Amino acid sequence: MKLTKTPNRLINEKSPYLLQHAYNPVDWFPWSDEAFEKAKNEDKPIFLSIGYSTCHWCHVMERESFEDTEVAEILNKNFVSIKVDREERPDIDTIYMAVCQAITGHGGWPLTVILTPGKKPFFAGTYFPKQDSRGMPGLISILTRVTELWQNEREKLLQTVDDITNAIEKNFFTHATGSITEDTLSGAYSYYENSFDPEFGGFGRAPKFPTPHNLSLLLRCWKMTGREQALEMVEKTLESMYLGGMYDHIGFGFSRYATDRQWLVPHFEKMLYDNALLAIAYLETYQVGKKEKWAKIARDIFTYVLRDMTSPEGAFYSAEDADSEGEEGKFYIWTPDEIKDVLGQEDGERFCRQYDITPEGNFEGKSIPNLIKTGYQNGDPQLLKQLFLYRDRRVHPFKDDKILTSWNGLMIAALSLGARVLDAPEYAAAAEKAVQFIRQNLRREDGRLLARYRDGEAAFPAYVDDYAFLVWGLIELYQATFKPDYLSLALELNRDMLKYFWDEANGGLFQYGSDAENLISRPKETYDGAIPSGNSAAVLNLLKLARLTGDRDLEEKSRLQLKAFGGSINETPMGHSHFLMGVWFDIVPPIEVTLAGNPNSGEMKEMLRAINSVFRPELLLIVKAPGEEGEQLSDIIPFIRDRNPLEGRAAAYVCTNYACRQPITDVKKLKELLG
């Protein structure tokens, strides 16, 4: 069926996902009062479709159904149809994804939900083909049946509405209180140990997601217990992900997940958040054992992000699609003849042997470059560059160029850590540019943070993830640059987060603010899935800011937050790895180091290298420079006011487990102290 030449209402939206549907014959509405008023006035149910621009099965459902005039006719006659970009409206997505999981036992995108005009759901699923197929009901059958029931047996259709709404509130958004102890960490570790794949790394069977915060938690378990297996699981997983096709060996960066056990065949879309969190995992693992390959992979991730995913103003784009020219993975796959045409016969044959490019292929008759069979890790940069330049002339996958505050916060954190660990100030400079963009474009005049920027428009009051991830990034950026302004901004945004999201009755943080649109539920998310939850990031932020500044009120808030979710997290610790990093940070003896002196002096740089070279995630670093910046920092952190250089030399003030030692000026002694 041909697309209509007349655009629907989505043509006026900024979301790339909504704009992809702007020429569908379906009479789409964005989520709006207008849509719900129309449904109410015309007594029609709502057909709600949620997805995102780089979602492969969203594209499939669009081609099969939403571009089809037969489907459009049924929808336009009997429903009011609403499209939602889950990355712009995670609040809507969270609620109705919980509905889908409650009704069907699973979830995913595209998410398909049918609602009353009052926003209450009574049907949910994910992808549906147009016609009944392979035991799946087709969309036409579903829409036809719902229409019949709505018109003739509505009471029967709606008898479960309140039950569904109550069930998601009770089972998904209500949390049990309790105390979290070291035993909870042990429970999570046992799960990872039992589900670890010793042959290919990762946990469980296919599909395999990177979930880098699981690896970061395991590094902390290794640090706490000395269990070598924890470190081995991390290194095996990082190695296997890199060797597989989930890593783009030609252009760098990681895809979203692997569809198979050995990480060979990716779901080819690339997400900003995965690459930020993976960079952090590789950097931390590099700190542990100083294996250069981990540093190289982190650098390559940053090369990809700064080259392909950064706006001219310095903010970071959201994602790249799996599909190009209507085919999944087409941009990334090769034949031996192509390789030899680019590199010549001898180099081409060698490259094909190293990277498993074969005549029979490993993906739909062509080959995804990978190193699973050879383990080869010394690729010729010149050959890779030639292939990159050749591939660059292909039709590129679609790039979702919207700028999300939350995901930018994660990349700011990753780049800032990279600047410290790799002694690479250019990464801190890139992080600073992104912060500057957010300050200028994603804050209202009253200071309220906004969630999304695209094409000159900032929109949507920011969610808890936006605040928590940006504060995380700012804490890391302060410790990379030691500019007091970033610490001050982190504290300011953290105060706003508590103002808009804190649950005064039960503790914890709601997903959307008290000043935002009121939906059928107000969730508090703690699950650390592909991306950590805002609550998980916030608990670690609160603890770090409390220790950095000596603010006991922030520490008390963190305790309330730990207690608010403790019972639920004890039940499923493996699903809360980032939250448990906050628990770990609270349990281990803290280390705070204040360096007093000129940050550009040779001895200060030596001290910084000594600190940044070790894996000490419990260590918080303050640098008090002379002059105005030092005074500004002392206003934020009063207890450092009397910490100064000693006899003109840079001095390190080290406090461990709440006891402060005599200041030292000798780098060797500092190294000994830090272990």
Image: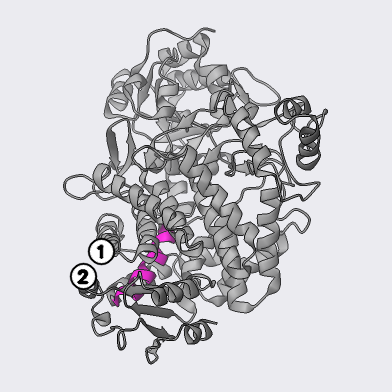
Residue receiving disc 2: 632
Magenta region? 535-550
Q: CA distance from mark 1 to mark 2?
A: 9 Å
Residue that extends furthest to the bottom in the rendered view of this protein: 662
Q: Is residue 548 magenta?
A: yes
Residue 8 lies left or right of residue 629; in this view the side is: right
* Quadrant of the rendering where the C terminus is positioned: bottom right
- Examine the rendering and report whether any part of residue 619 can be seen: no
Residue 638 x/y as whole percent: 23, 79
Foreground: 529 or 418?
418
Q: At x 41% / y 12%, what residue is drawn?
A: 77
Q: Tell me, what colour scheme is on the image? A: one colour
Residue 377 lies left or right of residue 626; in this view the side is: right
Residue 172 x/y as whole percent: 47, 51
Residues at circles 1 and 2 in contact by the CB criterion of under 8 Å: yes
Q: Dot 1, crowdedness within 10 Å: few (<14), some or many (≥20)?
A: some
- Examine the rendering and report whether any part of residue 665 can be seen: yes
Q: Is residue 650 magenta?
A: no
Identity, as a three-letter code, of the amino acid under mark 1? Ser
Residue receiving disc 1: 488
Relative vertical location of residue 128 with respect to residue 410 in this rendering, above or below:
above
Foreground: 272 or 114?
272
Q: Nearer the viewer, mark 1 or mark 2?
A: 2
The dominant secondary structure in magenta is helix
Q: Which mark is residue 253?
A: none
Relative vertical location of residue 657 with respect to residue 314 in this rendering, above or below:
below
Q: Secondary structure at mark 1?
A: helix
* Quadrant of the rendering where the N terminus is positioned: top right
Q: At x 52% / y 21%, what residue is drawn?
A: 62
Identity, as a three-letter code, of the amino acid under mark 2? Gln
